[in-house]
Image: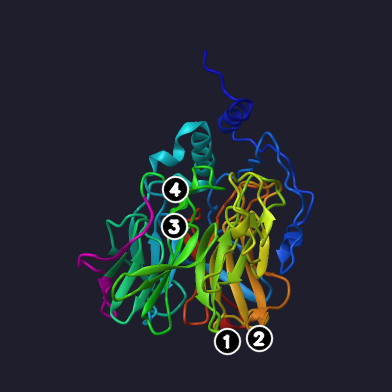
């Protein structure tokens, strides 16, 4: 007779009811924030914490709460799971309307099935539109009047970057390019492959982002891990949990930095020229572990995953261990709270919002499922000075959860729009929000 292990039996019940369960946080989100976050002992429980904020969308006329001195309005609405944004030099806004590709091996077994149900309730279960849409604010009033299908029939596209007359798009399984002319509203040319990226039927962290070096000769691509903590085996992690450096002309690539569980947003710090990224850390060792983080990315550095976190804090779940590699692990620069799912990242350009948002880093926090109470579900700003974080995060947009702790929206990508606004993709609300200084609206 077939019997479920107790752990999986409980998970099955959780999936059936999708109720909040497991342990609760003993620390504040702020305790897991900053250059030296508190890292309690792992809280290993029979039942992993599952605390879904069910996706319900925005009621008519509702919107996030903007920080004092700013205001927010919808730049575009009725999109199909908008995840990532890119602003072209002429001000046109590209939005990747996208979701997870088919990855049947990722949902095998009871645990995989449970997680599929969990993510579905959180708003991640819709089919992928597999397109990039162009939005144009013709009259410069802060609302996109026109939209066109810019690229279609892609494969879970995410990151975008323009170098000269080439637009690069990071699909889930390859980096491709298209010819681009300023002002065009759609591209019909066939894609040119630059390099294959890890994908396939087991493709746990499917989002791939891309950013170009200042001279355009190199492309930096984020590739998330294929698991939580290598439970599928390290052979399934080849080339993953890393940022790749790709030669734009040849497609030759190398691992620029590794041990980054799920890097997403990237940008260049304006004063030092260093590459920064936002990284989602591991789950299922308690509501207070492990803080997600943003960090400058050192060439050749190892950041711990899967063997350790925050430098050399060993994760005992990983077997076999690798003490030699752990000894090389470096700690990231700045924690942004446990399980906040910090994805979007862009530096202030000095003309988008007034102080205190004029020098530092905007972060789109998609929100937790593995923490009680919830964390994330907002856009925050980390002040910088001299090219380094300097101070505590300041809320830019909040109010994405309603009074019943249901998600009206979930912020993802963030980008400056070149006209004094911060654009925020909301993949549950199916909107793009635009934040401006209150004075700019007068």
Res. 424 visible in picture: no
**Regarding mark 1 in the picture, which secondary structure is present there?**
loop
Can residue 103 be seen here? The reply is yes
Q: Contact (CB < 8 A) between labels 2 and 1?
A: yes
Q: Identify the mark at residue 271; answer none if there is no mark.
A: 1
Where residue 17 sits, quadrant-wise, is top right
First in residue order: circle 3 vs circle 4 = 3
**Which label's residue is closer to the chain start, 4 or 2?**
4
The furthest residue to the left: 189
- Residue at the spot x=77%, y=56% of the render? 28
Mark 2 crowd level (few <14, some 14–19, many ≥20, 10 Å Cα): few
Dots 4, 1 in contact, CB < 8 A? no
Mark 3 = which residue?
207
Direction from residue 176 to residue 273 in the image, left or right? right
Q: Earlier in the sequence, mark 2 or mark 1?
A: 1
Distance Cα–Cα, label 3 vs label 2: 31 Å
Alpha carbon of mark 2 to alpha carbon of mark 1: how far? 7 Å
Across and down, in percent, residue 202 comes to 41, 45
Which contiguous range is marked in magenta? 178-199
Mark 3 element type: loop
Q: Is residue 45 positioned above or below 238 on the image?
A: above
Badge 4 element: helix
Residue 373, position as x, y percentages in the image = 71, 48
The numbered mark at residue 400 is none
The reply to whether callout 3 and callout 4 are in contact (CB within 8 Å) is: no
* CA distance for labels 4 and 1: 38 Å
Asked if residue 410 lies left or right of residue 404, the reply is left
Proximity of marks 3 and 1: CB atoms separated by less than 8 Å: no
**Residue underneath mark 2:** 386
- Residue under pointer 4: 236
From the viewer's perspective, is residue 122 above or below residue 216?
above
Secondary element under disc 2, as helix, strand or loop, is: loop
């Amino acid at each position: 007779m077939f019997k479920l292990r107790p752990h999986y039996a409980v998970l099955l019940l959780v999936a059936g009811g999708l109720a909040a369960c497991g342990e609760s946080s003993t620390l504040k989100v702020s305790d897991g924030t900053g250059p030296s976050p508190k890292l309690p002992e792992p809280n290993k429980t029979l039942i992993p914490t599952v605390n879904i904020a069910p996706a319900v969308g925005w009621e008519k006329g509702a919107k996030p709460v903007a920080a004092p001195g700013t205001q927010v309005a919808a730049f575009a609405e009725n999109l199909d799971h908008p995840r990532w944004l890119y602003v072209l030099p002429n001000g046109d806004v590209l939005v990747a309307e996208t979701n997870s590709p088919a990855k049947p091996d990722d949902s095998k077994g009871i645990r995989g099935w449970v997680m599929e149900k969990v993510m579905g309730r959180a708003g991640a279960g819709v089919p992928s539109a597999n397109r990039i849409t162009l939005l144009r604010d013709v009259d410069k009033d802060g609302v996109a009047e026109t939209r066109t299908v810019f690229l279609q029939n892609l494969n879970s596209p995410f990151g975008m970057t323009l170098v000269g007359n080439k637009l690069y798009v990071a699909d889930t399984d390859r980096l491709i390019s298209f010819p681009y002319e300023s002002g065009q509203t759609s591209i019909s040319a066939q894609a040119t492959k630059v390099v294959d990226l890890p994908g396939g039927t087991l493709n746990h962290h499917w989002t791939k982002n891309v950013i170009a070096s200042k001279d355009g000769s190199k492309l930096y691509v984020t590739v998330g891990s294929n698991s939580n903590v290598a439970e599928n085996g390290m052979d399934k992690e080849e080339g993953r949990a890393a940022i790749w450096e790709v030669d734009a002309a040849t497609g030759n690539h190398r691992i620029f930095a590794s041990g980054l569980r799920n890097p997403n947003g990237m940008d260049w710090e304006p004063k030092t020229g260093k590459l920064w990224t936002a990284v989602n850390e591991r789950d299922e060792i308690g509501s207070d572990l492990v803080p997600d983080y943003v960090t400058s990315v050192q060439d050749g550095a190892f950041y711990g995953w899967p063997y350790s976190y925050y430098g050399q804090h060993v994760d005992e779940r990983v077997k076999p261990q690798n003490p030699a590699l752990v000894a090389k692990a470096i700690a990231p620069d700045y924690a942004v709270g446990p399980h906040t799912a910090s994805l979007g990242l862009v530096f202030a350009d000095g003309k988008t919002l007034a102080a205190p948002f004029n020098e530092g880093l905007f972060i789109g926090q998609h929100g937790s499922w593995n923490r009680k109470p919830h964390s994330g579900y907002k856009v925050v700003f980390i002040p910088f000075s001299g090219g380094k974080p300097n101070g505590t995060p300041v809320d830019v947009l909040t109010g994405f959860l309603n009074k019943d702790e249901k998600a009206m929206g979930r912020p993802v990508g963030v980008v400056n729009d070149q006209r004094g606004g911060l654009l925020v993709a909301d993949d549950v609300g199916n909107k793009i929000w635009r934040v401006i200084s209150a004075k700019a609206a007068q």
